[in-house]
Image (tube, rainbow, N blue to C red):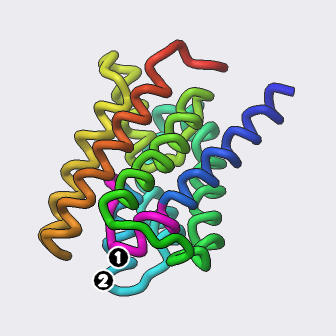
Amino acid sequence: MRLMRKGLVILGGSIFIALGINLFLIPYKVLDGGIIGIALILNYLWALKPGLMIIFFSIPIFIIAWFNYREYFYNSLHGMIISSFLIDFLQPVVGFIHIEAIYSSILGGIFVGLGIGLMLRFKTSTGGTDLVAQLLSDKTGVNVGILIFIIDTIVVLCGGLLLSADTLLLSVITIFFVGITTSLITRNIQIV
C-alpha cells in the first residue's frame, strides 16, 4: 500500500510539473530554475527535448547520490524518469491555453511547485537540483523550498542573460511561486 501511494504521488507530481512547464512556461519562453531551467534554456536555444536534457544533466547528481545518499538515489530516480518522460510526452499541449504571460508565469510556478512539493513530502523528488536542495536541507535544517529558490535564481539569472529581459522578469515571477508553493507544501512534517 505504501509503495502504491508513493507511486501515485510520483505520477501526480510529475503530471503537475509537466503541465506547468508545457501549458504555462514554454509558450512564453519562461524558465524555471535548476536542472529544469537548464533544460528549458537548451530547448529555447536549440530545440532540444527538455525531458531528455533533464535526464542528461541529472546523471552527475545521481552518481553523487549513489555513493553518498543511496536512499535519495532510489527515492528520486523514479521521479526524475517519470517527470522527464511526461514533460516530453505532454509537449503537444504547448499553446493549448492562451492567457497573459504574467498569469502564465504565476500558474506555471504554482503547478511546478505543487509537483515538486508533493513529491518532496513523500521523500521523493525529480532529482536534479531538487535532490541537491533536499540533501542540503537535511544537513542544514533550512527549508527545502528556500534552497530551491536560491538555486533557481542563479539559473534564471544566467538564462535571462542568454534569452531576453522579458524571459528574466517572467522567470523570476515563476521561481518565486515555485519556491513559495514548495515551501508551503513541505513545511510540515514529512510523510513517509
Indicate the amino acid at tag 2: Leu
Q: Is residue 26 above or below residue 31?
A: below
Residue under the point 18% across and 63% down: 168
Residue 64: image x %, image y %?
43, 44
- 1 and 2 marks in contact (CB < 8 Å): yes
Residue numbers of the magenta segment: 21-34
Residue 94: image x %, image y %?
53, 76
Residue 166 seen = yes
- Toward the bottom, the furthest residue is 46
Residue 158 in the magenta stretch? The answer is no
Quadrant in the picture for residue 10: top right
Q: Is residue 82 above or below residue 135?
A: below
Q: Quadrant of the N terminus?
A: top right
**Residue 158 versus residue 101: which sits nearer the camera?**
101
- As drawn, is 2 to the left or to the right of 82? right
Q: Is residue 55 above or below residue 95?
A: above
- As drawn, is 24 to the left or to the right of 123? left
Q: Quadrant of the C terminus?
A: top right
Indicate the amino acid at tag 1: Leu
Quadrant in the picture for residue 32: bottom left
**Residue 101 versus residue 22: which sits nearer the camera?**
101
Marks counted in the figure total 2
CA–CA distance in space, label 1 to label 2: 5 Å
Residue 114: image x %, image y %?
52, 40
The residue that disc 1 covers is 42
Residue under the point 18% across and 60% down: 169
- Toward the right, the furthest residue is 1
- Which disc number belongs to residue 45? 2
- Neighbourhood count class around disc 2 (C-alpha, 10 Å): few under 14, some 14–19, many 20 upward: few
Q: Secondary structure at mark 2?
A: helix
